[in-house]
């Protein structure tokens, strides 16, 4: 089952990213984010009804709510990024942060044991994120601040 769900998930992510990127060029980022999150919630509720679990504990519900809130907040800021800066900066920073947070959550809350390479990679994300987000680029002055009249 996992072999079918993984590529389906990748296709869904790719399609949503593509369509979301097109929409972000045309409408305010909140108009893209809110319906997407509501749609995801409705899909999760339907999936939970169709594929019931043997038992649902209160901690399962709390983790699900926290995950949904975290994902919604992340999408809000990810979609806000292109309206405030270059997507070539926003995408890698958000991708690296998302992976690092997932690994850290597993290590601290689920007793996962990341490898030394994983810990090293997460440590390298801090200076990488700082370097990527602080650089100058089109429409920015040499100090990384937006140049007057750039928009």
Image (spheres, grey):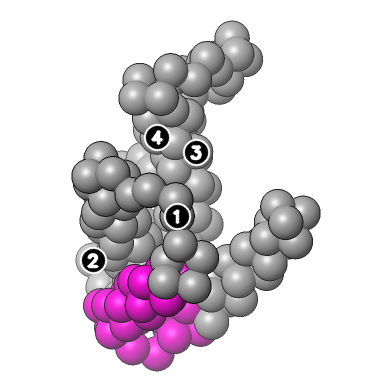
Asked whether, in this view, residue 80 is left or right of residue 98, the answer is: left
Q: Residues within 10 Å of mark 4 (few under 14, many from 20)?
A: few
Residue drawn at point x = 59 percent, y = 9 percent: 116
Report the number of numbered marks.
4
Q: Which mark is residue 99?
A: 3
Q: Which residue is at the front of the view, 104 or 2?
A: 2
Image location of residue 109, percent across then percent down: 34, 25
Secondary structure beneath dot 1 equals loop
Q: Residues within 10 Å of mark 1 (few under 14, many from 20)?
A: few
Furthest-bottom residue in view? 26
Q: Is residue 21 visible?
A: no
Q: Nearer the viewer, mark 3 or mark 1?
A: 1
Q: Is residue 2 above or below residue 11?
A: above
Q: Which mark is residue 148?
A: 2
Image location of residue 23, percent across then percent down: 44, 85
Which residue is labeled 1 in the image? 53
| N-terminal label among 1 and 2 | 1
Q: Is residue 27 visible?
A: yes
Cβ atoms under marks 4 and 3 closer than 8 Å = yes
Residue drawn at point x = 61 percent, y = 76 percent: 15
| N-terminal label among 4 and 2 | 4
Furthest-top residue in view? 116
Residue drawn at point x = 75 percent, y = 61 percent: 4
């Amino acid at each position: 089952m996992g072999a079918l769900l993984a590529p389906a998930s990748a296709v869904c992510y790719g399609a949503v990213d593509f369509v979301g990127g097109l929409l972000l060029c045309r409408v305010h980022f909140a108009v893209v984010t809110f319906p997407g999150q509501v749609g995801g919630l409705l899909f999760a509720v339907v999936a939970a009804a169709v594929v019931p679990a043997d038992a649902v504990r209160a901690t399962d519900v709390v983790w699900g709510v926290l995950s949904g809130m975290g994902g919604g907040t992340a999408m809000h800021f990810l979609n806000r990024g292109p309206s405030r800066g270059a997507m070539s900066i926003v995408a890698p920073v958000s991708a690296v942060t998302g992976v690092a947070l997932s690994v850290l959550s597993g290590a601290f809350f689920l007793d996962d044991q990341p490898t030394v390479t994983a810990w090293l990679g997460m440590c390298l994300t801090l200076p990488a994120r700082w370097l990527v987000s602080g650089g100058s680029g089109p429409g920015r002055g040499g100090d990384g601040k937006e140049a007057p009249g750039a928009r």
